[in-house]
Image: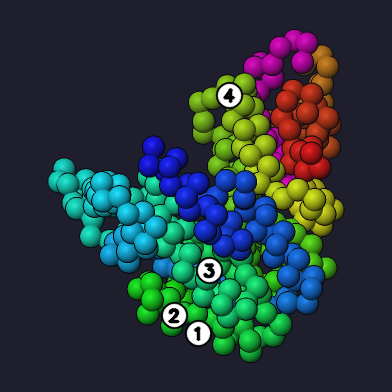
Amino acid sequence: MILQVMTPIWEPRFSAHSYGFRPGRSAHDAVQAAQRYAREGEDWVADLDVTKFFDYVNHDILMGKIAQVIRDKRVLGLIGKFLRRGHTADGMVVRSIEGTPQGGPLSPKLANIYLDALDRELERRGHRFCRYADDANIYVGSQAAGERVLESIRRWIEKHLRLQVNEAKSGVGRTWERKFLGFRLNRARQIEAAPESIEGFKSKVREMWRSCQSRTSNQLREAWQRYVRGWVGLLPAGREPKTDLPAGGMDWTAHSEMLLAALAQREGPRAQSPATRAERPHALRLPSAPRGAWHLAGTGSLQTALSNRVLRRYGFLLPSDLADC
């Protein structure tokens, strides 16, 4: 209820460069704004990430910023209790002296209130930037400018917000060298999934289709459809389908893992119905092939028996089926 009341009060005050946890704004909008900056020639980026931001928010600074707008002491007292409510560790309640409760309904709004000062400082300096929660990208015209801005802003954050910049995740590079919210801009200034995101997709596919699972085909299909729809749904609208998503390679990964799971769950010809054995007798010899599952997954017999067309017919969608939706 506090969030519902605070939202219309604070939203008009926030910067237009802030995209995280705000109604009507999304990560897609942030990435598309970054694309505009790069196409206008500012394709060097100072990538700024705050170390464990939600764990180290200073309560005094945060409450001071809130009190500048909200004067009702009852409301301020409730927010203070929310911040200090703590957590349970080894059966004991540990009170919080800093940070905001991760997963709490009010924490995203408090995060934007706390970091609004950073947005205003960047605007005062005339920078072009995008911020999504504690992940901020500042777009400049050269490497030297990026390094200078990153160091200057790091000092400002430590002094005024009492936070530490994550040196391992922060840095300066071209837009195609740094990722932002799981995406990057390639040399043609087009949005594409970052290589780390693609590898994460492949790892998840292997996990979902591992053979040692006691799930029916219907359960596998439903879980897979939810995941692949959600993953493709994260891609920004208006992207370049042929360049931003290597759907062919992702299709191959998904298809191969599906075939491996199908092979592992087979018990041989006797496990198949007479109709299946009559329809595809060439596939029955596969379980006894000596070269392993990966070799079998690439054989013409199995590719024919369980082609992409067959998988689609039974509801096992592939990334390319949804990439252009």
Residue for badge 2: 156
Horizontal side, residue 71 vs residue 179: left or right:
left
Residue for badge 4: 219
Residue for badge 3: 119
Identify the amino acid type marked 3. Answer: Asp
Query: Which one is earlier in the sequence, the residue at label 1 or at label 4?
Result: 1
Magenta-drawn segment: 249-276
Viewer-nearest of discs 3 and 1? 3
Label 3 SS:
helix
Residue 91 or residue 311, whichever sits in front:
91
Whole-percent x, y for residue 82 in the image: 28, 47
- Give the CA distance from mark 2 to mark 3: 12 Å
Whole-percent x, y for residue 200 in the image: 59, 52
The quarter of the displayed image where residue 32 is located: bottom right
Can the viewer see residue 275 in this picture? yes
Q: Label 3: how many residues lie within 10 Å, few (<14), some (14-19) or many (20+)?
A: many
- Give the CA distance from mark 1 to mark 4: 52 Å
Placement of 81 over or under 280, stated as above or below: below
Residue for badge 1: 152
Label 2 SS:
helix
Q: Are marks 1 and 4 in contact (CB under 8 Å)?
A: no
Viewer-nearest of discs 3 and 4? 3
Residue 138 or residue 47, whichever sits in front:
138
Query: Which one is earlier in the sequence, the residue at label 3 or at label 1?
Result: 3
Can the viewer see residue 198 in this picture? no
Q: Are marks 2 and 1 in contact (CB under 8 Å)?
A: yes
Placement of 116 over or under 139, stated as above or below: above
- Give the CA distance from mark 3 to mark 4: 46 Å
